[in-house]
Amino acid sequence: MDFNLNKQQELMRQLMREFAENEVLPLAKEIDETERFPEETVLKMARNGMMGINIPKEYGGAGLDTLSYIIAVEELAKVCATTSIILAAHTSLALGPLLKFGTEEQKRKYLVPLAKGEKLGAFALTEPNAGTDAAGQQTTAHFDGDRYILNGSKIFITNGGVADVYIVFAMTDKSKGTKGISAFIVEKGAPGFSIGKIEHKMGIRASSTAELVFEDCAIPKENLLGQEGKGFGIAMGTLDGGRISVAAQALGIAEGAFNETVKYMKQRVQFKKPLSQFQGLQWKVADMETEITCARMLVYNAACAKDEGKPFGKDAAMAKLYAAQTAMRVTTECVQMHGGYGYTREYPLERMMRDAKITEIYEGTSQVQQMVISAAVLK
Amino acid sequence: MKIIVCIKQVPDTTEVKLDPKTGRLIRDGVPSIINPDDKNSLEAALQIKDNDPDTRVIVVSMGPPQADIALREALAMGADEAILISGREFGGSDTWATSYIIASAIKKIPDYDLILCGRQAIDGDTAQVGPQIAEQLGIPQVTYAQKIEVNGDTIIVQRQYEDFYQNIEVKMPCLITAIKELNEPRYMTPGGIADAYSVKNVTVWGFADVPVDPEKIGLKGSPTNVYRTFSPEAKGMGRILDGSDRNTVKELLSELDNKHLL
């Protein structure tokens, strides 16, 4: 058993840390306050080949492993959770299913430009009445000979409105329940496809979260992803992978807040000594460091399991459950340790605390992760 | 074109301290990086390659086996080949012996057009190795380049001085040393990192691979004797004057006057 990163993964961390500090950190505060989608950062990530890190080179990616990609999400999240989820939703949720379930033709047409960063991807499963109960899809897709006609709407879609390619789930046969769900590739600008409400959120405020509306939206039959009726499995399998990246995001948020706090503790003097010399605070630091290390082990373990081709659903659920809880606990504690300063926008802690909360909710709430874990244990 | 870029792996001196007893660098736990000026020289080579894809960029470094990662980083930025000159016999070499060894290694690389080096390394700060390599090879050198432009079989170099610059046209093969104003080094790319550990490789040249006179390398081949190294005494904190130009200049003048410096 080897807990060390290899040299390639270490170089990946060095690259992403430099990129995050030079290109992402300077924008983090501004884009949070203005809810502005950081197009320029996405362009820079595209130019630097970061939009398809774990996609094989033959499909326009970098050809690295899942762990290298997870490290990228973690390093971005340390300074800006918004930027990390733009990359994570694109890579795990759009490129992931295209790579795994796409035909060669679909890969050439969609995966290659997405992995090169020429286009941005998104994943659309959630509906007003189908959140945790994802099987309750009400969007329909009716086959009419050479195309599918989609009707319905999706909500809370990350990268919605800014993405060029969407993986959309819809009922092709309502009578079959989850076996009647199919997955489709929908391009921006498809007739009958429009963007509805853009959400205003507590955290990850510069990430675009949108409603998608389909009104007799015609999709060529070649854009069915996988087989008809297999959409639910595609969605669940994709989310298993996505959870590792959200877990990495949560880990990064916790690490970012913790690093800021360690720095602050050495500088801030109260009662004539730095905060770092107060035992009560030292104990908090010890607990946080331990929790973050546990979270990191769980996240990397899930990524390695995926790389090794092992079943990783339970590992991913445990990583996300624990890392998200850690992010919430650590950021809340770090705001507390900064006192009044932590509550102001002058310091990044309050942003990190707001950003942390979503990791307990999206891509399966913490309660869904508990369902997945217990189902695997009690089967 | 064939371009050789010489790089050095150095401790990140923003994080380095001297052992007060021995006067030596405390290297434990200090991250190693590619010397910043050397990164500018690599970027210059890669920009030439961007314009002329037939260009081949070969990175050369002398150092311990751990310098491998610095060369992999250079490969991940886009260099084509990497050579690590590494062997116990080379240890203890000063700038003179080092440039002799590197020049001897470069002589094994046929038909190069250009050698690019950083101006100086942030650990030793001598700025000697680049120019000495050129002397050893008997080729022209232009130092402190802030701009370079390939022009047929010559290169036009803009050299930086404190308050002016100088344009020099030099025939290739030649050696140029880069300063940070030359360019903004690019990032590695994830795909480049994958290549650096798969399709590309770092070739290690040991003592047996480099044709050198054993008397002219290592400690015994090094004419430099370090008499003593020490940390300069910490000076008091500086003061930053805030406010309008008019007021800060006034305050500065009165302060200098008080200290009898005017």
Image: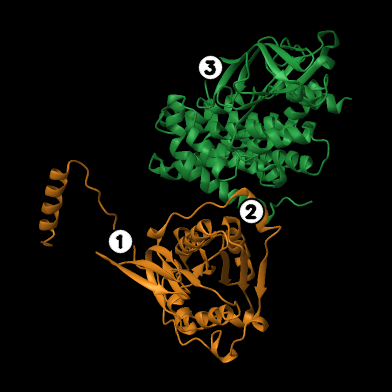
Count residues near mark 3 (Cα–Cα under 10 Å), then give few for <14, some for 14-19, many for 20+: some
Residues behind callouts 2 and 3 on a single chain: no
Q: Which chain carries label 2?
A: B
Please state which of the two labelled residues, at mark 1 or mark 3, is closer to the viewer: 3
Front residue (pair A332, B252)? B252
> Between marks 1 and 3, how big is the CA–CA gap?
55 Å
Count residues near mark 2 (Cα–Cα under 10 Å), then give few for <14, some for 14-19, many for 20+: many
Q: Which color has been applied to chain A in this rendered view?
A: green
Q: Judging from the image, what secondary structure is the residue with disc 1 in? A: loop
In this figure, which residue is indicated by the disc labeled 1?
B235
Q: Judging from the image, what secondary structure is the residue with disc 3 in? A: strand
Q: Which color has been applied to chain B in this rendered view?
A: orange
Sooner in the amino-acid sequence: mark 1 or mark 2: 2
Label for residue B193? 2
Q: Residue A165 at x, y = what percent?
A: 64, 27
Front residue (pair A367, B105)? B105
Residue type indicated by callout 3: Ile
Instruction: Look at the image and tell me whether residue A280 can be seen.
Output: no
Q: Judging from the image, what secondary structure is the residue with disc 2 in? A: helix
Q: Residue A1 at x, y = what percent?
A: 79, 51
In this figure, which residue is indicated by the disc labeled 3?
A198
Relative vertical location of residue B142 with respect to residue A245 in this rendering, above or below = below
Residue type indicated by callout 1: Lys
Relative vertical location of residue B129 with respect to residue A234 in this rendering, above or below = below
Tell me the quarter of the picture where residue A226 sits: top right
Instruction: Look at the image and tell me whether residue A233 can be seen.
Output: yes
x 45%, y 84%: residue? B224
> Between marks 2 and 3, how big is the CA–CA gap?
37 Å
